[in-house]
Amino acid sequence: MAHDHSHHHSPILTNVNRAFQVGIALNFIFVIVETVVGLRIHSLSLLSDAGHNLADVAALALSLLAFKLLKVKSNQKYTYGYRKTSILVALFNAMLLLLSVGAIIYEAINRLLFPQIVVGTTIAWVAAVGIVINTLTALMFLRDKDKDLNIKSAYLHLMSDAIVSLGLVAGGIIIHFTNWYWIDSVLGILVAVIILFSTWKLMRNSLRLSLDGVPPEISLNEIKNTAMGVKGVLDFHHIHIWAISTTENALTAHLVVDEDIHPEGEFAIKQTLRHQLLHKNIQHITIETERRSTDCGEHACNATLAHSDGHHTETDTKSKPLQH
């Protein structure tokens, strides 16, 4: 059996720390401004957007915490450290946003039944500030948004906030010129719908990873085809792939080679396969070798299972191996 533990700290961890800190600070200040102004002019659209932004501040803070925990070293009780925290945080963020959708829609329906007078120009000016803040902070995550689920979550939250703020600007101008105060409630519902659409995929993916499902960007069939394409591989089965964090994936599988192959040849096959799987975004690889005559069950091999070299090999493609 061969293990490949690539325990590295991606450069994105340092790149996004400042982005998270700036995003949290600016958005929290903006939440206070929206809340104060929204209460003074009785604007549901501003108050609902403040609630949305407060949820985003919490999401950003939790994501930053998750990235900090990624740096915590593994120990005897948590052999992968606290990497899974990043997945749980992504799931919690999605659930938090979905709860805010329900609250916003409930209040918006009440306001549609009983509209209140609001100042359109004030809504427009405050929302314009929101466009600037959310766009600038979202751009700080743009480069790394496809490298991690939590970074993508932060980017989507902030960009959706900018779009919502743009809608509030337009709505505030319309209210100013028409006195159609019900538009304030409609804008509140619009906020909720945008949150729902931007959050659904995040919810689905984070739940999938929490249940140790195959990460969305990885195809089980493609992984098997990659293994079967390596010279000397007769079969590749009992494949299990799951996410250790939002940036790292793991695989265990049984590799079948010819019973006559030399141990050095088997080692070379495993090294080649390990290298190719790393390019498929699988960093932690455990391969158990079988000979062609071996009959293995799902959970354990019978007594005829043969290992070519009689020992485990630990390799590290990027940094130090995990200390067991």
Image: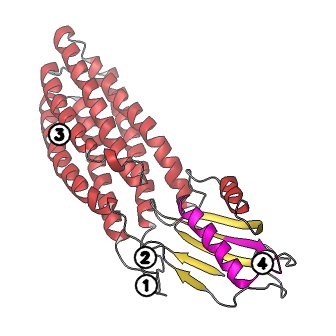
From the image, tell me which residue sits under label 4.
290
Tell me, yes or no, whether the two marked residues, 3 and 2, touch with CB atoms within 8 Å: no
* Structural distance between the alpha carbons of marks 4 and 3: 64 Å
178 sits to left or right of 202 = left
Q: Amino acid at mark 3?
A: Thr
Numbered disc 2: secondary structure? loop
- Residue 298 position in % (x across, y down): 78, 72
Residue at which label 2 appears: 81
Kindly state the secondary structure of the residue where label 4 is placed: strand
- Nearer-the-camera pick, 309 or 50: 309
- Which residue is located at x 48 percent, y 80 percent? 79
Q: Residues within 10 Å of mark 3 (few under 14, many from 20)?
A: many
Residue 216 to residue 47: above or below:
below
Q: CA distance from mark 3 to mark 2?
A: 39 Å
Q: Which residue carries the number 1 mark?
A: 75
Front: mark 4 or 1: 4
State which quarter of the image contains the N terminus. bottom right
Disc number lying in front (3 or 1)? 1
- The answer to which of marks 4 and 3 sits earlier in the sequence is 3
Label 3: which secondary element? helix
- In the rendered image of this protein, does residue 213 appear above or below residue 267? above
State whether residue 134 is above or below residue 164. below
Q: Earlier in the sequence, mark 1 or mark 2?
A: 1
* Amino acid residing under circle 2: Gly
Using a 10 Å C-alpha cutoff, classify the residue at mark 1 as few (fewer than 14 neighbours), some (14 to 19) or many (20 or more). Answer: few
Asked whether 40 falls inside the magenta stretch, the response is no
- The answer to if 275 sits in the magenta stretch is yes
